Amino acid sequence: MSAEFISVSFPNASNDLDPIPDAPVDPRYLERYARALDDYGFNYTLIPYSSSSFDPFTIGATVLAHTKNIKIIVALRPNTVYPTVAAKSLATLDQLSGGRVVVHFIAGGSDDEQAREGDFLNKEQRYERQEEYIRILRLAWSSTEPFDFNGEYYQFKQFRSAVRPTNGTIPISVGGSSDAAYRIGGSLGDIFGLWGEPLAETKQQIERIYAEAAKAGRTDRPRIWVTFRPIVAETDELAWEKAHRVLDRLKDNRERGLHRVAPSAPRPANVGSQRLLDIAARGDVHDRALWYPTVTATNASGATTALVGSPRTIADSILDYIDLGADLISIRGYDNFNDAVDYGRYILPLVREGIREREEAKKKAAA
Ligand SMILES: Cc1cc2nc3c(=O)[nH]c(=O)nc-3n(C[C@H](O)[C@H](O)[C@H](O)COP(=O)(O)O)c2cc1C
């Protein structure tokens, strides 16, 4: 049993509580944030993507340059870079950092968002294109001979890359909750990314992903990544007070047009967000401490489910997911920098201790 921790990196101090519209890169902030994640023992940090946001390759390169151990997860939409170019960019970063690169695929959940960068395929086609893209990356990284590709979305002749990943390949992650996401991530992903849902729903999703892996004839399975936005304080009571302050702030920012989702935004088109909103409609608190009002307040714009409580409560909640089969736990707060430090100080050690205790109990039971 093991688990690794993921954070998310942003290039400036703007966050959901104190948004700074169109804030430029703050190199010192990024360096300080990246170093804190590295020092506190996070294993990965996601460099997210949206049509209006910064270039994840250069932000990722900066994180790598300032750190020693943490790996970056570059969010990549296939419509934004030709696959042979991405294969080399990722492998270049991987060589520069001694093998610290992962790529996370985003098929694109919203037609409107995709259209902003000239992508007019429908979602099913976007997932089909993503499947070709993943196959091309793996060929580019492994093939020593020039090769042709004759797909529906990509055709080229005699491509060969001299830029190989440090450890032979680069892990490929897929995220989403639609049938196509399960099919492509289950059959081709090294990692499958999920947003934080209650334990029962998470179990169902994991089973779907594993079933797709088996159907594709795989003997291994994608590692499972689950995402939360913990709200932590010294005691449960203080954490709930803090959670309501966070919620008020999110609502207020959205009403004032300061949140990336407009107050009048329609129901989101991606299945992952629709699932979160449906679960939110069933109740505010699920399982130990999984809290949904932050989902409703932000129209489920990405990973928005909170875990609320003391470090003990949050660590126990995370351990529930690890017991269920999660391999990678993403925790990012609503106050990015301060929360990352709190998680590093108080939550990561408790979860790691919980894993050690489980390992020892297993060994004793087997003896
Ligand atoms: C862990 C995780 C991280 C994600 N990161 C991003 C991101 O940085 N940018 C983005 O546009 N979509 C991101 N997504 C969204 C999707 O990968 C996906 O394109 C979308 O949700 C597809 O919708 P579906 O649920 O209908 O399959 C992420 C999803 C997950 C699960």
Image: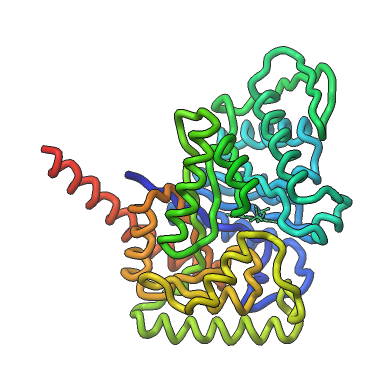
**Which image quadrant shows ligand 1?**
bottom right
- Residue at left 56%, top 34%? 99
Q: Residue 141's spot in the image, x, y percent?
A: 66, 25
Image spot of residue 208 (x, y percent): 50, 47
Which residue is rendered at x = 41% and y = 61% of the image? 199
Total labels drawn? 0
Residue 42 percent across, percent down from the top left: 47, 53
Above-or-below relation of 142 to 343: above
User: Which quadrant of the figure contains the N terminus?
Assistant: top left
Task: State the residue at coordinates (76%, 17%).
Answer: 147
Location of residue 22 by image quarter: bottom right
Residue 342 appearing in the image: yes
The residue nearer to you, when weighing 227 against 167, is 227
Q: Quadrant of residue 354?
A: bottom left
- Residue 39, can we see it? no
Which residue is more in the foreground, 325 or 51?
325
Up-down relation of residue 303 to residue 128 (above or below): below
Specify whether 20 is left or right of 197: right
- The vertical placement of 339 against 364, above or below, is below
- The quadrant in which the C terminus is found is top left
- The residue shown at (63%, 66%) is 274
User: On the picture, is 92 further left or further right than 2?
Assistant: right
Instruction: Identify the residue at the far right of this view.
Output: 118
